[in-house]
Amino acid sequence: MLTKEFAQRSELSEKQVRKIVQHLEERGYHLNKTEYRGREATDFKEEDIELFQEIAERVAQTNSYDLAFEALEKEKDFLQVI
């Protein structure tokens, strides 16, 4: 599913979804990709919803994507989640 549909299903804004994707990719995590209208797009899965909601919730608590990711990486083996 593409960003717009994923954002609606996960009850996040498209901007939040894009920002989380950006931070995941900066940390070396690889998300599934697909081609949409001749461009590469993230191919979200239903099971990604809970993860993105958890990240967004942590960002809201810390007011920082970096702090949110650091906390989540310490709490759980984040590489296995993605």
Image (cartoon, helix red, strand yellow):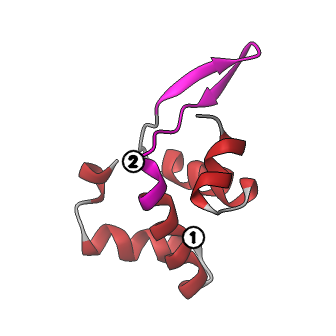
Q: Is residue 51 above or below residue 57?
A: above
- Count of picture labels: 2
| SS under mark 2 | loop
Crowding at dot 1, Cα within 10 Å, few <14 / some 14-19 / many 20+, comes out as some
Q: Is residue 41 magenta?
A: yes
Quadrant of the drawing holding the N terminus? top right
Residue plotted at (52% across, 49% down)? 26
Q: Residue furthest bottom?
A: 61
The answer to whether 34 is drawn above or below residue 15 in the figure is above
Residue shown at 53% from the left, 70% from the top: 66
Sequence order check: which comes first, mark 2 or mark 1? 2
The magenta segment:
32-50
The amino acid pointed to by label 2 is Glu
Which residue was labeled with disc 2? 47
Answer with left or right where residue 65 lies relative to residue 19. left
Q: Tell me: residue 76, above or below residue 23.
A: below
Give the structural element (helix, strand or loop) at label 1: helix
Instruction: Determine the residue positioned at 57% across, 21% down.
Output: 34
Numbered circle sitting on residue 65 = 1
Q: Nearer the viewer, residue 50 or 66?
A: 50
Counting from the top left corner in percent of width and height, residue 81 is at 29, 53
Q: Amino acid at mark 1?
A: Tyr
Does residue 30 show up magenta in the picture? no
Depth order, front residue of 3/64: 3
Q: Is residue 54 above or below residue 15?
A: below
Query: Where residue 55 sits in the image (x, y, percent)?
Result: 49, 67
> Hey, which quadrant is residue 30 in on the image?
top left
